[in-house]
Amino acid sequence: MHREPRDPHPAPQVGVVVIGYNDAAHVTDAVRSALAQGPAVGEVVAVDDCSTDGSAELLDRLAAAEPRLRVVRRDANSGGCGSPRNTGIDAVTMPYVMFLDSDDLLPSGAVDALLAAADEARADVAAGLCVRRELPSGREQPWEAPLYEAPAVLARPAQRPRLVHDTLCVNKLYRTAFLDTHGIRFPEGRFLYEDIVFTARVLAAAPRMALIPDRVYLWHVRRSAERLSLSLDRGSVDNWKARTQACELAYDILLSAGQKELARAARTKFLDHEVRMYVRELGLRDAQYQRAWWAHTREYLTRYDAADWEANPGGPGRLLGRIVLESPEPRDLPRLKELAARPARLLPPYARAADGSPVWSADLPQVSLAPLLTRRTGLLPLAVDAELSPRARGSRLGLRLHELYGRVAEAGPREVEVEWRSREGGGTARRATAALAPAGADGWSAELPVDLAGLGEGTWDLGLTVNFADGTSRRATAHALAGAGRLRRHAVPSARHGVLLVQPYATHSGALALRVATGPRGVAKVARSRLRRLLH
């Protein structure tokens, strides 16, 4: 999309709605990031949802020196995000509106980029890339990046069904008249996952849309915060019920508007995103939660019709849904966790039905894995076991690739590329490649050296790429082998650092990762952290 240079002094056109509740530590930073967007932002409407921590007073002081800032105080706390956003929409006087949460930021140039795209495309909605930033590590991960790889203009959302996956409202610029004309608002009150419903209402109205690759929103994820955000607080099964409620309402909205393709895509997304995310955490919950989650999910999936199950037949989400639907009680949770990983890993056993066709297990033969026989090699849920052996003289990484109903042998596994990715910095430190050699009748193995001193301080995720003789490849992660002291902490002498403290561990999805502390200072830091946890 070609863009003409923008007027350096554009007329005010955008109102930014900032919502907050008891977030005095961050709300003024959010507001300042909106004001810093420049003259295109004609007003910032800060809606305080009846805070008691002095947030409103901070905003009042900021507004006294900034004529573009208006502070709106709600009379009673809504318990959610939808009502204050609706209050903000009703207060905005600009042709366009954006949303910003009190603990997030708008990066420089975000409003100008979205406004330019909306103007040029005559779009009702302009959307850009949101980046999730984990705090305090600073690790960044783009949200739904494939949607925003290149500029695009869509006459209607159905041209890109993947849009149902981007349920955020905050990385978008909306024409205010479009929202008003179609009566598009958020669910009121304490309604979790209000974004899912709001986005469905927007897509149902078939807006003309502009997509841009620019970073337009910084979503701060604070998992260690004393008060978790509503979306991160998943410890109660009520959270899951709220999520399914929002997804069902979104489906009904799209279907009622005649957006059948988008409605179908929303159901596929529920399996591929929501179900996989919660299944990865299911083993962390107690038995009561697991039974309640399983029963509720089974009931919800009974509403799927045959066409819903036909979409992406070999996909991990569909397989997970079928297993839940066909089993009255929670089962195979460790194996399901691996299947729910990204990329998916299907661990043994690899069972077959009486007719020889692939099935989930001998006691659940009604869940067929036959679609794996025709699935592209690059999409197969490959299972690779990994074991790290930290040693004073030459640490080693052992890998074993499993056969998968003949598909791996058919493609001809040739080599595996290994990379260690920094959890803190997001970069890749060490890469290595090793040939895969046959290991018995049902697997292939490789062994590589690991330069632990070269990795250095931090947390490292192991990433793999399996290359096949037929020219295809598959990105994968490795299943962390446990037991027999495999995942214990090691102190390793180091010429560079004096000593390394090395901790191989399994992530929530079962993948191998690595923590490294360097030198006496790093070891002392780990010891202090462990002591604090014990005392706590």
Image: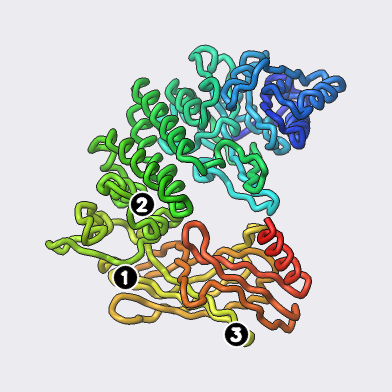
Q: What residue type is labelled 2?
A: Pro
The circle on residue 394 is: 3
Residue where numbered disc 2 is placed:
316
How far apart are labels 1 and 3 at the CA level?
29 Å
Asked whether, in this view, residue 248 is left or right of residue 442, the answer is right
Q: Where is residue 77 in the image (x, y as percent from the top left)?
A: 64, 22
Quarter-wise, where is residue 525 in the image?
A: bottom right
Q: Position of residue 207 (x, y in %)?
A: 48, 23
**Is residue 501 shown left or right of residue 254?**
right
| Helix, strand or loop under label 1 | loop
Provide the secondary structure element on which disc 2 rests. helix
Query: From mark 2 to mark 3, how far is it between C-alphas?
Result: 37 Å
Q: Nearer the viewer, residue 360 or 127?
A: 360
Q: Quadrant of residue 176?
A: top right
Q: Farthest residue toward the left?
A: 355
Identify the image quadrant of residue 31: top right
Q: Which mark is residue 403?
A: 1
